[in-house]
Image: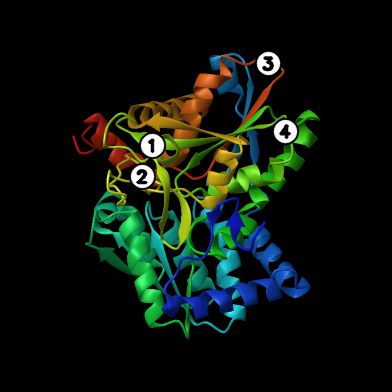
Amino acid sequence: MRKGRFSQYGGQYAPETMMGALQELEREYRRWRNDPTFEAELAALLKNYAGRPSLLYYAEKMTRDLGGAKIYLKREDLNHTGSHKINNVLGQTLLAKKMGKTRVIAETGAGQHGVATATAAALMDMECEVFMGKEDTARQALNVYRMQLLGAKVHPVTSGTQTLKDAVNETMRAWVTRIADTHYVLGSVMGPHPFPTIVRDYQRIIGAEIKAQILAAEGKLPAAILACVGGGSNAIGAFYDFITDQSVRLIGCEAAGRGVDTAETAATIATGKVGIFHGMKSLFCQDDFGQIAPVYSISAGLDYPGIGPEHAMLWEKGRAEYVPVTDDEAVAAFEYLSRTEGIIPAIESAHAVAHAMTIAKEMTPEQIIVINLSGRGDKDVAAIARYKGVSLYE
């Protein structure tokens, strides 16, 4: 595999002003990633601060109610800050510290990556600024205040669709103006090399834990692992250690929005085409002229018009499946898991729960499904109430 390439995807399509920073980042990452001191510091942070290993929970009531497969939930929602994002953020922020940077910046959609970045910056005494689409600041007002409470400056982005795509644009612009003291903590397995590899490596702890935990609990591998997919960091984290285990289905659940047959969708694999955007070659939702198309999802964390290059490769090679899940299906799963197991999932994670509810019934009790519950749903409760037409103040 060529450096930074996943089959035909990936690469480093970046302006000259960014190349020096990318080269520095790759050099320093290679220097520190296998350094025993760095590894020990990061392992201590993940254990003592983030709360790893996260729980692999047997969803007994859900299993009994649906019939068919035995269902486990990988509880990334129990991590400090409430999602899988802290895994990558602790790794990148510690790396930035080793590089001599004093400031970190980040994009965020649903706000979980922004909260995690602000948290790590507070812990490590670093300046922090977060770029978030104005539309998403309204949808995720709770997380905006959490970031501010942690000491971060939040910039509402008013360009374009005012969502995640535009937040990435603005963060990249901000990075090239202050490369000397600033590291861009990119939140997903996307962007120019080496970001897709770095983020994957810091998230693969999810799948490594799943494998050890399920073997300890059941003595065998699962039949399928499911995870929601926007850019794809929680999914690649859950999938990576199982890629060579051909008996395990890897299923990414995309945000179909109001349906893949409408313009209001963010299901990249289902509707996208090969293109170059945000420094990488991958699959993107595009219009008839090859321009990046506006996308929509009830989930602020999944309404990105592309997918990470490693996911594009896994799909092209047939190793992973990617299925669209609509807003209505995700909301129904959000409510179902809440009422069945007493666990309120992030609306992003609910996309994976929804598809698991469909396929579990088609499987046998000897088969096991693991759902990566990438985050908790506190941030989504008000938005789902509005979606359902429920007043919170009656």
Does the image show residue 334?
no
Q: CA distance from mark 2 to mark 3?
A: 38 Å
Q: CA distance from mark 3 to mark 4?
A: 20 Å
> Residue 352: x percent and y percent?
50, 33
Of the two numbered discs 1 and 3 in the rendering, the one whose residue sits closer to the viewer: 1
Find numbered disc 2 in the image and state the secondary structure of the residue it sits on: loop
Q: CA distance from mark 4 to mark 2?
A: 29 Å
Dot placed on the residue nearer the N-terminal end, 2 or 3: 2
Residue bearing the label numbered 1: 271
Q: Answer with the quarter of the image where residue 268 lies.
A: top left
Q: Alpha-carbon neighbours of circle 3 within 10 Å: few (<14), some, or many (≥20)? A: some
CB contact under 8 Å: marks 1 and 3: no
Q: Label 2 amino acid?
A: Cys
Q: Label 4 amino acid?
A: Gln
Residue bearing the label numbered 3: 365
Find numbered disc 4 in the image and state the secondary structure of the residue it sits on: loop
Find numbered disc 3 in the image and state the secondary structure of the residue it sits on: loop
